[in-house]
């Protein structure tokens, strides 16, 4: 069934007040009521039409939708004008697009809280052990003075008289297409459809106030830089029934110090002496989470790697750890005494190598300056 203009059906003007609409409806409903027009199908149709028109114009929401789109057809939750699709609303969207769309739908009283991001730096040790940590989160939390309503002493904001709560006001413009109805956000309420005449003094009518709250964050084992922990509902509080936002904790794993992460494996370097490299040795080194024993093989070469299995990092949520890869850095003495130099020459001689003369001008000689 095509929808007739409900203003026309009730014979009222577009600016008619709620009372005018009500009395017009009563008058017409009495006139066309099936009980007084028995057997007259036209009256029954008229009665239905009048009831439908009243249903639209007596409901601020539906009236606003009709004013805005010229129809309520195809809109959900419409018991009378249900069914059908397209219509003037779609055309309106097509002509005015998204740019005009910002003001098309009434904003609701409820506003969801913001999602928040928190950056947190943790250590490699935390990656091994996991971490439960209480952190301070700066968020907007519900104002206790007004219970989040923004109204002094609590209670609900008043419906805006400028737009009857619809959030929009309409105007008719003359264009080459004919008369075009346009909607703009109600200037009295900025499109919210309600006004707070006595804002809460504590939150200036916002319903929320800035606060710093402690939040317990459970970080599983094996996380990486960029791993994000999603905590639903721990963002800023919503107002007037809006849902709270979520908190996203973005993790940064600190790689300061001697360890370089490669996934589950970790690289590190250890200085050893020439004699350790030649003869081999057993030595203690600092692992990520404990002291470890490093077996330096005899004949170790500079840059050679020794792998300590299971001393790296666990996979996400724990499990078998990766390896610690230890690179051997053979340190050559920069200066030796005359006695040491003598032994090294002997060493070279024993190995059948050319015995260095120690007079290379390029390197400034083998012997250190005497003190
Ligand atoms: Zn408040
Ligand atoms: Zn308004």
Image (cartoon, rainbow, N blue to C red):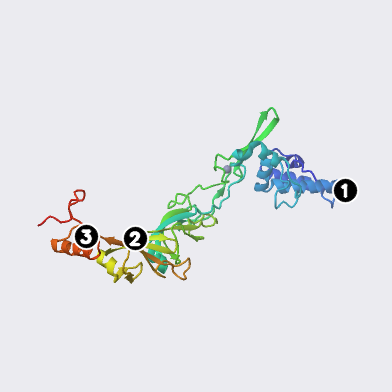
| Mark 3 or mark 2, earlier in chain | 2
User: For mark 2, what is the residue?
Assistant: 303
Q: Nearer the viewer, residue 86 or 174?
A: 86
Disc 1 or disc 3, which is closer to the eye? 3
Mark 1–mark 3 distance (CA, rounded to whole Å): 113 Å
Mark 1 and mark 3 in contact? Answer it, CB < 8 Å: no
Mark 3–mark 2 distance (CA, rounded to whole Å): 17 Å
User: For mark 3, what is the residue?
Assistant: 333
To which quarter of the image does residue 358 belong? bottom left
Dot 3: few (<14), some (14–19), or many (≥20) neighbours within 10 Å?
few
Dot 2: few (<14), some (14–19), or many (≥20) neighbours within 10 Å?
few
| Mark 1 or mark 3, earlier in chain | 1
View extreme (left): residue: 371
Dot 1: few (<14), some (14–19), or many (≥20) neighbours within 10 Å?
few
Task: Label 3, secondary structure: give it.
Answer: loop
Task: Label 1, secondary structure: give it.
Answer: helix
Image spot of residue 75 (x, y percent):
70, 48
Q: Quadrant of the C terminus?
A: bottom left
| Mark 2 or mark 1, earlier in chain | 1
User: For mark 1, what is the residue?
Assistant: 41
Task: Label 2, secondary structure: give it.
Answer: loop
Mark 2–mark 1 distance (CA, rounded to whole Å): 100 Å
């Amino acid at each position: 069934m095509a929808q007739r203009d409900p203003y026309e059906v009730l014979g009222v003007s577009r600016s008619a007040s709620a009372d005018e609409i009500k009395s017009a409806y009563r008058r017409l409903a009495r006139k066309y009521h099936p009980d007084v027009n028995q057997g007259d199908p036209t009256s029954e149709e008229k009665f239905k039409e009048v009831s439908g028109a009243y249903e639209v114009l007596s409901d601020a929401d539906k009236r606003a939708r009709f004013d805005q789109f010229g129809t309520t057809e195809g809109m959900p939750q419409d018991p009378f004008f249900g069914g059908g699709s397209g219509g003037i609303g779609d055309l309106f969207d097509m002509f005015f697009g998204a740019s005009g769309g910002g003001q098309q739908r009434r904003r609701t009283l409820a506003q969801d809280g913001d999602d928040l991001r928190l950056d947190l730096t943790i250590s490699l040790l935390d990656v091994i052990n996991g971490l439960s940590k209480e952190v301070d989160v700066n968020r907007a939390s519900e104002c206790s003075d007004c219970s989040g309503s923004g109204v002094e002493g609590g209670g609900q904001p008043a419906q805006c008289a400028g737009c009857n709560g619809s959030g929009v006001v309409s105007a008719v413009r003359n264009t080459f297409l004919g008369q075009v109805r346009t909607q703009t956000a109600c200037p009295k309420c900025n499109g919210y459809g309600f006004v707070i005449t006595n804002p809460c003094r504590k939150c200036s009518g916002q319903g929320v106030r800035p606060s710093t709250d402690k939040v317990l964050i459970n970080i599983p084992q094996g996380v990486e830089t960029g791993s994000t922990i999603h905590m639903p509902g721990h963002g800023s509080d919503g107002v007037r029934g809006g849902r709270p936002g979520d908190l996203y904790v973005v993790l940064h794993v600190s790689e300061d110090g001697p360890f370089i992460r490669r996934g589950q494996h970790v690289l590190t370097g250890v200085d050893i002496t020439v004699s350790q490299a030649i003869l081999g040795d057993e030595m203690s080194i600092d692992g990520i989470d404990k002291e470890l024993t490093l077996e330096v093989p005899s004949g170790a070469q500079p840059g050679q790697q020794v792998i300590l299995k299971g001393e790296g990092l666990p996979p996400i949520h724990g499990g078998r750890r990766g390896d610690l890869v230890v690179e051997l850095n053979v340190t050559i003495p920069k200066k030796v005494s005359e006695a040491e130099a003598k032994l090294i020459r002997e060493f070279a001689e024993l190995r059948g190598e050319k015995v260095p003369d120690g007079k290379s001008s390029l390197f400034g000689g083998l012997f250190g300056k005497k003190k």
